[in-house]
Image (cartoon, rainbow, N blue to C red):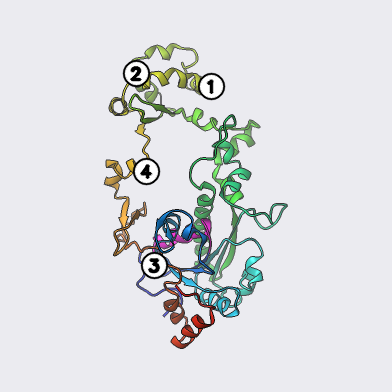
Amino acid sequence: MNAVASGSFNSGPLSGLRVVELGRFVAAPYASRLLADLGAEVVKVETGSGDPFRTFVQGRPGGLSSSFTALNRNKRSLAVDLRTAQGRDAVAACMRDADVFIENSRPGTMARLGLGYDDVRADSPRLIYCSISGFGEQGPYVERPGYDMIGQAVSGLASQLLDPKAPQIMGPNLSDSITGMMAVYAVLAALHERSQTGVGQRVALNLVGSTLAFLGTEAQRYLDTGVVPHHLTRPSGSLAFVFRCSDQRLLAIHLSSPPKFWCGLLSVIDRTDLAEDVRFSTHHARQAHYLDLRDELAPLFASRSVVQWINALAAAGVPCAVVNDMKEVFEDEQVKTLGLLRSFDGEEAATVDVPVQFSAHASQPMRPPPRLGEHSAEVLRSLGYSTHEIDEGLDEGWLIRQ
C-alpha cells in the first residue's frame, strides 16, 4: 500500500495524487485542502499540540475549531515530534512516496530539520516541493514573520480596502487565501511539466508576490498612468454602490458600463432628469462624480424596502442583490438551489461544498477534518512500520498520542 494513498479515502479528478502537507494556519493548509477536495490523498503532518488553528476560534470540540475545519477537511493527520530523528524520518518516508509536498515554514526551517528540497530530492526526484513564505527567500523582510494582514499591507491590497480617513481592518484573510490558491496553480503546473519530463521541482511563492499579482488592474493602472489607486477607485470605475433601504437592509447595485443598466436604474427611481445633469450625462462623468451620484441616490433608496427595490430593479434588468449576512446566505433560495451546503460523511456537521462540478465525476464524500494524530498508525503501517514500532513510537514520544 502507498505511504500516502489508501486507494479509497478520496475520489475525484485528482484521485491518486499523493500530497504531504506540513502547514500551519492558512496558506499551506488551504492549498492542500483545495487539492483534497478534488480527490488528492492528503496527509497533514502535525507536531506538538497540532496546527494552532485547531483551537483558534470557537467551533466543535476536540481541536476542531471553525477555522481548522474549513481548512483541513478531507485530510488525514500524522502527528510526530519533529525534534526527534524518528519523527523526521517518518516525514521523510512519507515524502518519498508523495507526488507533492507543501509547507509554509519560515525560510530555512525545513533545511534545519533535514527536510529541505536539497535534502530530499535525491530520494524523491519526482516530488513537487512547494514552499510558501511571507516575504520570499531574499530581501530585508525575510526574517520577519509574515501573516495575512502583513501580506495585505506590503502588497498594496490593504490600500484598496481601507478608508484612510477611518482605517479599520475588515473582512476575511484574503492574502493568505489568495496565496493558497496561487500555490495550487503552481503545483498543478509543475505536475503537468513532470508528466512530460518525469522530473519534479521546487516551486516557491509568498504572500506579497501572490497578493500583488492578484491586484492586476490596480497595479497595472499605476504602472500605466502613475496615478495611485485607492479604496474608491475600483467601485467608482465599475459604478458599484451599496445603499441602506427603509428596512435597514443593504442593497448592492452594479451599473458597470452597459448604458442599459443606467437607463434601467433611472426608470425605476423615476429620475430621468439625472441623465441631463452634466455630472452624470456620460459613463466617464458618472465615474468622475461617483460620490456625488452616491449622495443623490442614497435618499431615494432609503425610501423603500430592499425587497421592493430588488423586485423593481431586477424587472428592469439592473444588476442588484441583497447584501446577505452569513445566516441569510444559507437561507437564500439561489444558494439553496446551487447546493452549496454539504454534511460531512457520517456526521450532522455541515460545510460549504466544492463549487465546481465535473461531468466525469460524481460528487465525492466530504470527509470531516482529522483529529490530531487520528491516522498516524494507518499512515505509518502503510509506510511499512510494524505494530511494535508504532507502539514503541508512542511510548518513546516521537509519535504523538491523540
Image location of residue 260, percent across then percent down: 37, 24
Q: Where residue 15 is drawn, which disc sits there? A: 3
Name which of mark 3 and mark 2 comes first in the sequence: 3
Q: Dot 2 lies on which element? A: helix
Q: Earlier in the sequence, mark 3 or mark 4?
A: 3
Q: Which residue is mark 4?
A: 326
What kind of residue is marked 1? Answer: Ala
- The kind of residue on which mark 2 rests is Ile
Give the foreground label among 4 and 1: 4
Q: Report how far apart the C-alphas of labels 1 and 3 lie in the structure.
A: 51 Å
**What residue is drawn where x is 50% and y is 15%?**
279
Find disc 1 in the rendering and name its residue. Answer: 288
Which residue type carries mark 3? Answer: Ser
Residue 269 badge? 2
Q: Is residue 77 left or right of residue 227?
A: left
Q: Secondary structure at mark 3?
A: loop
Note whether 250 is above or below 262 in the view shown. Answer: below
In the picture, which quadrant includes the C terminus? bottom left
Task: Measure how far apart labels 4 and 1 are at the Cα level.
Answer: 34 Å
Residue 167 magenta? no
Q: Circle 1 — which element?
A: helix
Q: What are the residue bounds of the magenta stretch?
A: 23-39
Q: Foreground residue, 302 or 96?
A: 302
Q: Is residue 52 above or below residue 79?
A: above
Residue 34 drawn in magenta: yes
